[in-house]
Image: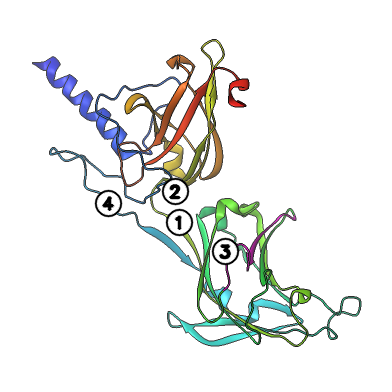
């Protein structure tokens, strides 16, 4: 009887670890067979639930919607913090969430620019204070933009925002190309921090146009609002891809490219990954990760996988966080090129 109680307790503990995700423990070589049928595969789906504190006796825990932590960047709306050139910046007559927007006005003038470059680059810059250099601690940089012009057509390269780092590296948000710019309506912008070069070293922001993309005499007005940094309250996989595994004499690994969001402490405790084939789980392993974009090598040598099609799933026991990608196991790199 005592043996049965102990075995039942161990089974319940294993189910709890798999369901909560981002749990402690696990590493290369630690495996756990799962007897139940694998959950349905949802390609590219990322959701935002909270990790449950317990599993009800009646079955799987109810889904809990993830919360998001937001840091408003209201000082970005202060015109005095910006340094304009060949343009003007002030408070907008437009109000969003009870706060005045930032108004950038640009009169395109082919004759009033710098002496060597009369057709120039109307621009403005914003220097980050120490308390604002926290982009790397968040998942997304977000704001809204509203544009009007004296012309009806929007150039392909309408406006640029640059995020400059101390090491001279820069990342860009290009309106008209990366972000479609529709006149006369608020356009939401969301830039993943993982796509920002050296986000932990950001020093300032810049906004500019190139006058050659406009006609002389064009009048441009851009309004900005809702600057903020956002992060998930819970560890989650925002994106995941897997490369084919190559096996040589029962050796091999699966290389996974993924973007992890949420608290750094939860990411360090690990994400559960399940490898399966035809709905049959082969291994469940929790691997430590870090926030942001990264590459992860999953050793599969001990499984002695035969060439074929497999499935790799993050958070397999949590449908709201589940992300799954196909994996093809091949015997040689020449097979991949066929």
Mark 1 crowd level (few <14, some 14–19, many ≥20, 10 Å Cα) = many
222 magenta-colored? no
Dot placed on the residue nearer the N-terminal end, 1 or 3? 3
In the image as oriented, which residue stretches furthest toward the left?
1
Establish if 292 lies above or below 67: above
- In which quadrant will I find the N terminus? top left
Q: Nearer the viewer, residue 104 or 324?
A: 324
Instruction: Specify whether 2 is left or right of 158.
Output: left
Dot placed on the residue nearer the N-terminal end, 4 or 3? 4
Tell me the residue that label 3 is attached to: 131
Residue 53: % across, % down: 25, 43
> Which mark, by number, is residue 231?
1
Dot placed on the residue nearer the N-terminal end, 4 or 1? 4
Mark 4 crowd level (few <14, some 14–19, many ≥20, 10 Å Cα) = few
Work out how far the residue at label 4 is from the one at label 3, CA to CA, in angstroms: 32 Å
Dot placed on the residue nearer the N-terminal end, 2 or 3? 3
Work out how far the residue at label 2 is from the one at label 1, CA to CA, in angstroms: 8 Å
- Residue at image position (63%, 68%) is 176
- In which quadrant will I find the C terminus? top right
Dot placed on the residue nearer the N-terminal end, 2 or 1? 1
> Which mark, by number, is residue 263?
2
Q: Are the residues tagged 1 and 3 within 8 Å (C-beta)?
A: no
User: Which quarter of the picture shows residue 76?
Assistant: bottom right
Q: Are the residues tagged 2 and 1 within 8 Å (C-beta)?
A: yes
Work out how far the residue at label 1 is from the one at label 3, CA to CA, in angstroms: 17 Å
Residue 157 can be seen in this image: yes
175 magenta-colored? yes
Residue span colored magenta? 168-181
- Residue at image position (62%, 85%) is 90
């Amino acid at each position: 009887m005592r043996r049965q109680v102990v075995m039942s307790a161990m089974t319940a503990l294993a189910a709890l670890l798999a369901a909560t995700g981002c749990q402690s423990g696990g590493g290369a070589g630690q495996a756990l067979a799962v007897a139940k049928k694998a959950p349905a595969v949802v390609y590219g789906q990322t959701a935002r639930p909270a990790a449950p504190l317990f599993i009800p006796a009646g079955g799987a825990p109810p889904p809990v919607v993830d919360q998001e932590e937001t840091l408003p960047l209201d000082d970005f709306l202060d015109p005095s913090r910006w340094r304009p050139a060949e343009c003007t910046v002030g408070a907008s007559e437009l109000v969003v969430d009870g706060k005045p927007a930032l108004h950038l006005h640009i009169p395109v003038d082919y004759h009033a620019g710098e002496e060597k470059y009369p057709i120039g680059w109307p621009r403005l810059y914003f220097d980050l204070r120490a308390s604002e250099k926290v982009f790397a601690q968040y998942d997304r940089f977000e704001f809204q933009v509203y544009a009007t012009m004296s012309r009806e057509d929007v150039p392909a390269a309408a406006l640029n925002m640059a995020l400059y780092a101390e090491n001279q590296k820069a990342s860009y948000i290009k309106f008209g190309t990366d972000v479609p710019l529709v006149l006369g309506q608020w356009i939401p912008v969301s830039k993943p921090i993982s796509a920002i070069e050296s986000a932990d070293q950001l020093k300032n922001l810049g906004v500019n146009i190139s006058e050659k993309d406009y006609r002389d005499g064009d009048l441009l007005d851009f309004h900005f609002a809702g600057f903020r940094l956002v992060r998930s309250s819970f560890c989650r996989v925002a994106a995941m891809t897997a490369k084919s595994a190559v096996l040589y004499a029962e050796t091999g690994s699966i290389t996974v490219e993924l973007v992890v969001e949420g608290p750094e402490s939860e990411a360090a405790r690990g994400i559960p990954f399940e490898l399966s084939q035809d709905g049959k789980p082969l291994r469940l392993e929790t691997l430590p990760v870090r926030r942001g974009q990264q590459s992860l090598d999953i050793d599969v040598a001990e499984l002695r996988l035969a060439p074929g099609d497999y499935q790799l799933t993050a958070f397999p026991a949590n449908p709201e966080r589940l992300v799954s990608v196909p994996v093809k196991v091949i015997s040689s790199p020449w097979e991949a090129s066929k």
